Amino acid sequence: MKETTWIIDTASGALTVEGMSESELTRLADDLLTAPSHVNCARPVNVPPARRVRARVGCDEPALRVHRIYHGSVVEGPGRRSVLQLMGCTLRCPGCHTPETHPIDGGVLISVGEVVDLLLDPEGTPRDGVTVLGGEPFLQHENLSLLLSELKGRGQHVTLYSGYTLEELRTRPEPSVREALALADILIDGRFVASLSLGAGEWRGSTNQRVIYAPGR
Ligand code: SF4
């Protein structure tokens, strides 16, 4: 039997259903629900890649290689998230859902300051925190840790994804890797394993991945 997850946003009344195809959902909405405003996959559809948002970076500014930024995701950490999807991953998990994020020289360079502005903009966007995923965020660990420091300074709850396990990250010698772990409120770790995707649980792609609170402790 197919597993589905139903999420009701108590602030807006929006209903999100996970685990159905768009056509199945549309049929269900037509049959059972009155006047659905739109159907999507629990994160906004048609998110433009970063090259289609503002992008400026000076030569001395710390910058991140960004695939895209979007708001209103309810499947990538607790509550409603503004999401930064970074570019670049060398792990090549078979069945990866985001192969477009793999090129390490893809996306667009955006200064850390502007990434913060884009994530926390527009004012009034319902947001319970910010999620950073990839690609593989730790490929850009130095400026990742700068970004997380800025976000924590603005009072944001931070959920961070990595294809590396926490144990692998802890063996890394770079101080910024430890700093990024210390700044994250939640780490969701480990490779995506397609054969373990059924019943992965909230926020995760496969059951081997873990939700680790305060990973820097
Ligand atoms: S770590 Fe994530 S982005 Fe990288 S290959 Fe695995 S699933 Fe894809």
Image (cartoon, rainbow, N blue to C red):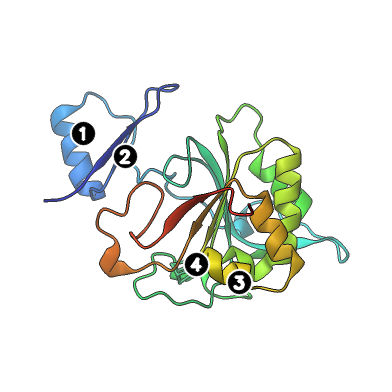
In this view, 168 is above or below 180: below
Residue 111 is at least partly visible in this image: no
Query: Which numbered circle lies on residue 154?
Result: none
Nearest the camera: 172 or 152? 172
Secondary structure, mark 4, is loop
Query: Which numbered circle lies on residue 29?
Result: 1
Near mark 3 (Cα within 10 A), the count class, few <14, some 14-19 or many ≥20, is some
Query: Which numbered circle lies on residue 163?
Result: 4
Question: Could you tell me residue 190's position as x and y percent?
Answer: 46, 65
- Amino acid type assigned to the residue bearing label 3 in the image: Gly
N-term mark: 3 or 2: 2
Task: Give the spatial CA distance, label 1 vs label 2.
Answer: 8 Å
Q: Are marks 1 and 2 in contact (CB under 8 Å)?
A: yes
N-term mark: 3 or 1: 1
Question: Could you tell me residue 213's position as x and y percent?
Answer: 53, 47
Query: Which numbered circle lies on residue 39?
Result: 2
Secondary structure, mark 2, is loop
Q: Are marks 4 and 2 in contact (CB under 8 Å)?
A: no
Question: Could you tell me residue 114's position as x and y percent?
Answer: 75, 49
- Amino acid type assigned to the residue bearing label 2 in the image: Val
Residue 11 is at least partly visible in this image: yes
Q: In which quarter of the image is residue 120?
A: top right
